[in-house]
Image (tube, rainbow, N blue to C red):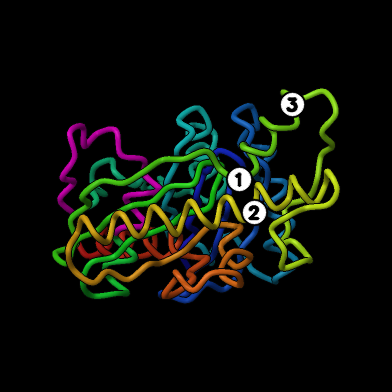
Amino acid sequence: MLLAIDIGNTNVVFALFDGRKVKARWRIATDPRRTADEYAVWLMQLLSIRNITRKAITAIIVATVVPRALHNIEVLGRNYFGIEPLVAGRPPVGYGIDVDVDQPSSLGADRAVNAIAAHARFPGDVIIVDFGTATTLDVIDFHGAYKGGIIAPGINLSLDALVGNTAKLPRIAIEAPKSASVIGTNTEDQMLIGVFWGYVAMIEGLIGRIRAEIGRPARVIATGGLAVLFDSHTAIFDAVEPDLTLEGLAILAERAAAL
């Protein structure tokens, strides 16, 4: 089986693949100081619960946007699985797509891997909306080339900034407002309306502008932790794919195995 590891700014996601099918997934808070031994204790217990031995894992692939966290993941693979992990974007695991931007090397591994998975799943032009620590929108053309995108603060970052820089505003949970009205009658409702419907309006507006600039039909694919929440309150998404990054890693691992 393949162990795919997506190191994000907030969480590290571990997923076991049998072919292209996800058999199990686990997540742990991202902490660059976490050692390979700490990862091993945690992961071995989770594998044991699933009755999976470490010998069942025959390949490991990693994508990271936190360079400082990579070393200990590589040590985990070497010391506990006897495997040298593949790293997305680093030889021999190139992305295999055209990156048509001013600084191709600056493209985050998660966004590149998302592009690979989206192009494999959906023909034609694609817009990917990834609700992570940052909210990113990425444009992939019908050839599979990465054409550029948008980076905006994630909704939780926006809420943290709002609460952290005001004296009296309370912390609230991110959820859909219970009322259909966009005129709040108390502080909490007004904050939730501003954050939630403001985000929906931003995504819909940006996608509209991107589509107009592309000038061709484009599917919109949502991924990331809050994608399902927003999908219930907008018709802008054609599909929600929570495992898009992991699927892209599985595709890269297959390509590497065929070399």
Viewer-nearest of discs 2 and 1: 2
Q: Which residue lies at the image location 67% right of the left edge and 42% below the top edge?
A: 29
**Residue at 25 percent of width and 62 percent of height:** 255
- Graded by Cα atoms within 10 Å as few (under 14), some (14 to 19) or many (20 or more), the crowding at tag 2 reads many
Label 2: state its secondary structure.
Answer: helix
Q: Which residue is mark 3?
A: 164
Q: How far across and down, in percent of the image, does residue 103 sit?
A: 21, 32
Upstream in sequence: badge 2 or badge 1: 1
Mark 3: give few (<14), some (14-19) or many (20+) Cα within 10 Å. Answer: few
Residue 151 left/right relative to 255: right
Q: Is residue 236 above or below residue 207?
A: below
Instruction: Give the mark nearest the N terminus, 2 or 3.
Output: 3
Are circles 2 and 1 on residues that touch, CB within 8 Å?
Answer: yes
2 and 3 marks in contact (CB < 8 Å): no
Residue 162 screen position, x and y as percent = 69, 32
Tell whether position 242 is magenta: no
| Marks 2 and 3, how far apart at CA | 18 Å
Q: Which residues are magenta?
A: 97-115
Q: Which mark is residue 196?
A: 2
Write the residue at 69% across / 58% down.
182
Rendered position, 171 above or below 227: above
Q: Nearer the viewer, residue 122 or 55?
A: 122
Q: Secondary structure at mark 1?
A: helix
| Nearest to viewer (mark 2 / mark 3) | 2
Using the image as rendered, state which of residue 119 and residue 178 is in the foreground.
178
Type of amino acid under label 3 = Gly
Q: Is residue 119 left or right of residue 40?
A: left
Q: Is residue 101 magenta?
A: yes
Residue 57 image position (x, y, % from top left):
51, 62
Distance from disc 2 to disc 1, alpha carbons, whole Å, reads 8 Å
Residue at the spot of label 1: 155
